[in-house]
Image (cartoon, coloured by chain):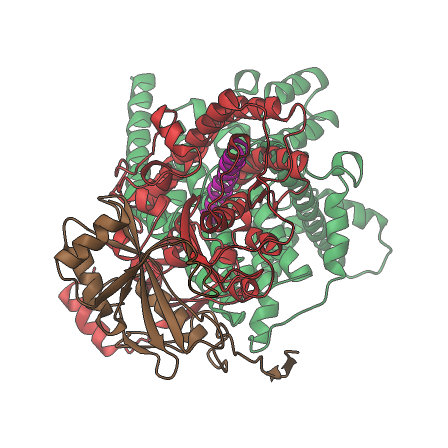
């Protein structure tokens, strides 16, 4: 960048790196989060995330409310994929209790979790376009998401924070006609998905903005404990639904109903922002396949196991991790046999994924910094809990 | 590999700091008040040897625990005088997990940092430190992460008292 | 800026028989009024017409943008305020006038207040040069295009002033990007305009438009030379960058810089910036319409001239309609692009400007000149 003559001039001129606050209120930080950047002109020389603006003491609350009462709090960490949060917590408690979940409940859980995955990835897709200046894909994504939220409203009454998947199963059976509407949604979504690919993913300007930007090598990803699309975007074939299957995923994988998209450095380096975006867009299509499998195989039956109203979980502890749209959502619950948990730890994938920014955001331009933050797809509710 | 196989391997390679294992069991009718233990098994590790234990787990090809999924701490109760430090390990190559527990006395909760072994532990340890008051020696960046920099006390302790007010905002 | 405009229009107005308004005022004025009053009054009327025109254009563009963006995004846009929301800009204007007049703490007060006025005045000065029909114009300048390019370049000063005076790091970023981007794209803008200048042979907008009359009013410059189409494309890309429209809207990039150099502005001051943006879009589109797409000429105006004679009232009205429709067609394309494409990064913008657009526009000029030479040789030889 600078010839030797220029460098001599630069030494005479005293410049100082500017500290720029991508502050708590900023259109590109996906929530209330502060990233203190040190910039030299447009070049970012250091980035330090500051968290805690949305810390709502979820873990402390877990030690003060009863097991069943804690469920609505789980909705609110990753509020864009609330079904998955419910699922993670319920599975952790069920693991300590050692109970069996009825099959129809598992089917409904899987359908809802995968539909929520589609909804969450739609937001990731839309807001990423918004960060980079393409405003229209956001509205197209929300058109589909509205339908998904309407589906959820029909089955559990809520659009964003569902508390639908409960300990032992689900609390409400699918109303008549719901399953066929889900199938219609899948058909329409497959068509619209092609629009998303053409409009944003294969757009030349988008590729120029995201290829070779924010490269996370596989080794760095594993070292930082990254999971989800960040890990798969770097080429590591790891998805909990396939590798440590839970619920019905063992059967679904055996039937070959879906595959795991991986980043491949198609338009740039392996592990760049485009690869992560590609993984998310492809995962939406795979989720549709899982939903179709469930629709083909669902049968009538009970939807919840017998759980007493005042639940006492036997003494013990368990950690259960599930595949959230953002990575591995882990719940570590400790019980001493009482009504209230001793410890209810939430391993939020966004919290862990955010740490990589300190290393990846150095040496990029400010426009790239925005692209990188968007590609980690964090939800600050999960980062801070 | 199941837990028994992992534990046997750890013993075979003489993993540093390995103290024992705890597996789920039924309530023992002969011991009064014993509720048994449900859930997952875990290994007990000496906290002072934790970094070398983690390094050993990663280096061994049969275990191959490349990733630390979670590191947290637990305060089991006001009448207990120990903290637990819980680490969840994951092996991508062999698709197995391991739960690791270290016991730290509440009077002197100090242990060496694992952040130099696994970078993900940096933020997890910052959270443990501010929430429980555990000191991780050698941590490269021991600032508060979720709490404000001037917060008093360690909230996730069972004997934590909320402050009266914080910068003029009442906490009661 | 206003003085320059006044001067041009006064000079125009001072020639006897050349200014409708001046003649009207002279006819109406009482005895004993000094000689300099009617031309000045005529000039003031002209200035107010320009301001009114720009305001109407801006208001219409606001409505058009909201409807266009709405329909591209599968929604309707404003629908309540008037039929399909056509009164929405008026409602917005009233709201903006009633907003609190905020100057941020630590901001340079003088520059902060002057910047939007500066920016708008530059565009108004450029607008004074655009004729509306062969009879209705504010100033007939021999160097019309040159004056327009010069005037519109000075908007950058206003933007940089706004960014600096806001006392905010984000505004400063917007201002710096604006300065870099506009300066970079002035070059391909000017060079790509050399192509129609060469073919038409004149800077004056009225003459250029008259030159494109021809058969059925379709002897447009864009058809006269194979290098005109590439030149137009380069011109269009350059004006996208000049008017800070997507994909070059970095100076005001919403998602990165909140609102770039406009972050600290609210109320009527902010609306000045927006008026400037839409007026600039219209201005450059009008330049494009004049120098590539025939200006006032179209089959309709040719037919009207044949049918009703060149002096009737219908012809100027059709000409006004033609130029407005052509300009707004280009404005519509600019809006369409904004809502489709993502934003380009600043270093990519600069690379494109210096490394690709400038050499390409030079090639166009070279090619166009060679073609003209050969064509003229063929015609004459």
Labels in figure, total = 0
Residue occupying image coordinates x 18% and y 69%: A7
- Is A154 left, or right, of B92 in this rendering? right
State the residue lying farthest toward the right: C30
Between A348 and A311, the residue placed more toward the observer is A311
Q: Which of A86 and C268 is in front in this view?
A: A86
Instruction: Name the colour assigned to chain A in the rendering.
Output: red
Task: Indicate the position of residue C260 as horizontal and vertical percent values.
Answer: 50, 59
Most frequent secondary structure within the magenta stretch: helix
- Residue sitting at x 28%, y 28%: C370
Is A260 or B158 nearer to us in this picture? B158
Magenta stretch: residue C47 in it? Answer: no
Q: In which quarter of the image is the N terminus of chain B?
A: top left
**Chain (green):** C
**Residue A45 in sight:** no
Q: Is A122 inside the magenta-drawn segment?
A: yes
Q: Position of residue B156 (x, y in %)?
A: 49, 72
The image position of residue B73, as x and y in percent, is: 40, 68
Name above or below for residue A94 compared with residue B127: above
Can see residue C333?
yes
| Quadrant of the image occupied by residue C1 | bottom right
Q: Specify the quadrant of the image occupied by residue B93.
A: top left
Q: Does residue A52 sit above or below C282 in this rendering? A: below
Specify the chain shown as brown.
Answer: B
Instruction: Please state, as top left, top right, bottom left or bottom right, where the C terminus of chain B lies in the image.
Output: bottom right
Residue range highlighted in magenta: A107-133
Report whether A207 appears left or right of C245: left
Q: Position of residue A358 (x, y in %)?
A: 33, 63
- In this rendering, is residue C182 above or below A32? above
- Asked whether C284 or C138 is in front, the reply is C284
């Amino acid at each position: 960048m600078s010839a030797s003559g220029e460098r001599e001039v630069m030494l005479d001129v005293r410049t100082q790196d500017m500290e720029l606050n991508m502050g708590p209120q900023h259109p590109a930080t996906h929530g209330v989060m502060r990233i203190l950047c040190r910039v030299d002109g447009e070049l970012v020389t250091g980035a330090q995330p500051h968290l805690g603006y949305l810390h709502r003491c979820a873990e402390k609350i877990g030690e003060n409310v009863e097991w069943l009462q804690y469920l609505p709090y789980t909705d609110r960490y990753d509020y864009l994929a609330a079904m998955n949060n419910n699922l993670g917590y319920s599975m952790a408690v069920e693991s300590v209790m050692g109970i069996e979940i009825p099959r129809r409940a598992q089917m409904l859980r899987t359908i809802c979790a995968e539909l929520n995955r589609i909804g969450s990835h739609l937001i990731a897709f839309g807001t990423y376009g918004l960060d980079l200046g393409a405003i229209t894909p956001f509205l197209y994504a929300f058109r589909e998401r509205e339908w998904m939220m309407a589906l959820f409203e029909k089955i559990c009454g809520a659009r964003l924070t569902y508390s639908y998947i409960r300990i032992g199963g689900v609390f409400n059976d699918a109303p008549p006609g719901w399953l066929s509407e889900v199938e219609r949604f899948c058909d329409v979504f497959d068509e619209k998905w092609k629009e998303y690919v053409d409009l944003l993913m294969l757009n030349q300007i988008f590729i120029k903005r995201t290829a070779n930007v924010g490269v996370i090598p596989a080794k760095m990803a594993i070292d930082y404990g990254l999971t989800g699309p960040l890990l798969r975007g770097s080429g590591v074939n790891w998805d909990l639904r396939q590798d440590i299957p839970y619920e019905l995923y063992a059967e679904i994988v055996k039937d070959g109903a879906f595959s795991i998209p991986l980043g491949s450095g198609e338009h740039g380096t392996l592990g760049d922002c485009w690869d992560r975006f590609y993984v998310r867009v492809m995962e939406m299509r795979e989720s549709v396949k899982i939903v179709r499998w469930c629709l083909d195989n669902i049968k009538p039956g009970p939807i919840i196991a017998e759980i007493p109203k005042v639940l006492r979980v036997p003494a013990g502890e368990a950690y259960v991790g599930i595949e959230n749209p953002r990575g591995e959502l882990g719940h570590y619950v400790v019980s001493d046999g009482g009504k209230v948990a001793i410890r209810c730890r939430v391993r939020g994938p966004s919290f862990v994924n955010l740490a990589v920014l300190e290393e990846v955001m150095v040496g990029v331009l400010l426009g790239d910094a925005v692209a990188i933050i968007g590609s980690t797809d964090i939800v600050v509710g999960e980062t801070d809990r | 590999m199941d837990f028994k196989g992992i534990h046997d391997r750890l013993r075979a390679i003489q993993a540093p700091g390995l103290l024992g294992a705890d597996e789920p069991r039924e309530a023992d009718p002969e011991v009064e008040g014993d509720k048994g233990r449900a859930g997952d098994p875990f290994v007990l590790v000496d906290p002072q040897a934790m970094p070398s234990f983690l390094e050993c787990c990663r280096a061994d090809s049969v275990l191959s625990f490349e990733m630390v999924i979670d590191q947290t701490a637990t305060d089991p109760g006001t009448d207990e005088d120990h903290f637990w430090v819980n680490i969840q390990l994951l092996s991508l190559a062999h698709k197995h997990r391991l739960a690791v527990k270290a016991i730290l006395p509440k009077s002197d909760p100090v242990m060496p940092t694992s952040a130099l072994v696994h970078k993900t532990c940096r933020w997890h340890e910052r959270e443990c430190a501010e929430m429980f008051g555990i000191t991780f020696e050698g941590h490269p960046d021991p600032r508060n992460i979720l709490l404000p920099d001037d917060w008093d006390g360690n909230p996730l302790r069972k004997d934590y008292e909320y402050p009266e007010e914080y910068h003029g905002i009442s906490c009661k | 800026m206003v003085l320059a405009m006044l001067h041009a229009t006064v000079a125009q107005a001072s020639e006897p028989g050349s200014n409708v308004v001046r003649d009207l005022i002279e006819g109406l004025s009482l005895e004993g009024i000094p000689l300099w009053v009617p031309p000045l009054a005529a000039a003031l009327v002209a200035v107010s017409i320009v301001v009114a025109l720009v305001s109407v254009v801006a208001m219409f563009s606001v409505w058009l943008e909201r409807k266009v963006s709405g329909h591209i995004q599968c929604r309707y846009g404003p629908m309540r305020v008037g039929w399909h929301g056509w009164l929405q800009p008026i409602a917005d204007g009233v709201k903006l006038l009633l907003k609190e007049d905020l100057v941020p703490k630590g901001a340079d007060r003088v520059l902060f207040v002057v910047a939007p006025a500066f920016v708008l005045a530059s565009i108004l000065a450029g607008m004074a040069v655009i004729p509306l029909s062969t009879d209705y114009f504010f100033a007939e300048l021999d160097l019309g295009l040159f004056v327009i390019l010069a005037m519109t370049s000075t908007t950058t000063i206003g933007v940089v002033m706004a960014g600096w005076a806001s006392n905010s790091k984000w505004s400063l970023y917007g201002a710096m990007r604006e300065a870099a981007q506009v300066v970079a794209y002035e070059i391909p803008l000017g060079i790509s305009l050399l192509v129609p200048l060469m073919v038409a042979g004149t800077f004056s907008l009225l003459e250029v438009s008259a030159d494109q009359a021809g058969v059925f009013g379709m002897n447009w410059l864009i058809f006269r030379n194979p290098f005109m189409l590439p030149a137009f494309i380069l011109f269009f890309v350059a004006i996208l960058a000049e008017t800070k429209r997507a994909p070059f809207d970095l100076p005001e990039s919403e998602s990165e810089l909140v609102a770039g150099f406009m972050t600290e502005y609210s109320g009527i001051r902010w609306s000045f910036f927006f008026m400037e943006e839409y007026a600039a879009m219209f201005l450059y589109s009008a330049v494009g319409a004049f120098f590539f797409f025939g200006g006032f000429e179209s089959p309709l105006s040719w037919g009207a001239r044949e049918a009703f004679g060149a002096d009737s009232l219908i012809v100027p009205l059709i000409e006004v309609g033609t130029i407005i429709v052509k300009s707004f067609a280009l404005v519509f394309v600019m809006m369409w692009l904004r809502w489709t494409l993502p934003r380009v990064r600043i270093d990519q913008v600069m690379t494109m400007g210096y490394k690709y657009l400038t050499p390409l526009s030079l090639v166009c000029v070279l090619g166009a000149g060679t073609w003209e030479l050969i064509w003229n040789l063929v015609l004459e030889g």
